[in-house]
């Protein structure tokens, strides 16, 4: 099954109609690379309204098949969730090359639970991205330093 088929099936099993505009958005997502902004998708689809692009992205986020990723510069990106749908995770974001990796976050989740019980809050959600330099950028740096 292609990624596009997978996305279409997710919408259909959640009883959402796959209109022609939505299908165009889904196709654009699968071709947009590891992560992308809503504007990237709008540029790829000049004939689809911005509102449709934003609504479709929101729907996919709600369904757990697309993640939102906040880059270090404050820009909001989207990314297909390549893990099992709805699995809670965080993102490692390389600030040099822009690579994003998904990380399961059991320990962090435990801390959140602890925080909730200590503070008396009922926590509905949290957002955590981890910024740094990926292994390959760090290797490049070391090679550069010796050369
Ligand atoms: Zn993700
Ligand atoms: Zn990197
Ligand atoms: Zn978490």
Image (cartoon, grey):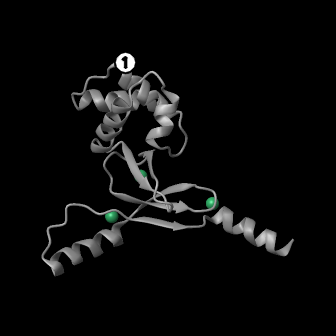
Nearer the observer, 138 or 37: 37
Q: In this view, does 136 lie above or below 120?
A: above
The quadrant of the rendered image in which ligand 2 is seen is: bottom right
Extreme residue in the right direction: 147
Image quadrant for the C terminus? Answer: bottom right
Residue 48: image x %, image y %?
Answer: 41, 24
Residue at image coords 55%, 41%: 33
Q: Is residue 65 above or below residue 93?
A: above
Residue 119: image x %, image y %?
Answer: 16, 79
Q: In which quarter of the image is residue 1?
A: top left
Residue 137: image x %, image y %?
Answer: 67, 63
Residue at image coords 80%, 69%: 144
Extreme residue in the bottom direction: 118
Q: Name the residue under label 1.
A: 20
Nearer the observer, 76 or 2: 76
Q: In this view, does 80 lie above or below 120?
A: above
| In this picture, residue 64 sits left or right of residue 146 | left
Q: Quadrant of residue 65?
A: top left
Residue at image coords 50%, 46%: 35
Residue 37: image x %, image y %?
Answer: 47, 44
Crowding at label 1, few (<14), some or many (≥20) Cα neighbours within 10 Å? few
At numbered mark 1, what does the secondary structure look like: helix, strand or loop? helix
| In this picture, residue 124 sits left or right of residue 82 | left
């Amino acid at each position: 099954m292609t990624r596009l088929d997978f996305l279409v099936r997710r919408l259909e099993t959640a009883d959402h109609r796959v209109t022609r505009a939505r299908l165009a958005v889904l196709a654009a997502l699968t071709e947009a690379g590891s992560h992308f902004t809503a504007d990237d998708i709008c540029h790829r689809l000049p004939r689809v309204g911005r509102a449709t692009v934003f609504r479709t992205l929101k729907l996919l986020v709600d369904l757990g098949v697309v993640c939102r990723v906040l880059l270090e510069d404050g820009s909001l990106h989207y990314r297909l969730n390549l893990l099992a749908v709805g699995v809670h995770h965080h993102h490692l974001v390389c600030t040099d090359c822009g690579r994003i990796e998904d990380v399961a976050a059991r320990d962090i989740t435990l801390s959140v639970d602890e925080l909730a019980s200590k503070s008396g809050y009922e926590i509905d959600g949290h957002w955590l991205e981890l910024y740094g330099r990926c292994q390959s950028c760090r290797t490049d740096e070391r090679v550069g330093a010796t050369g």
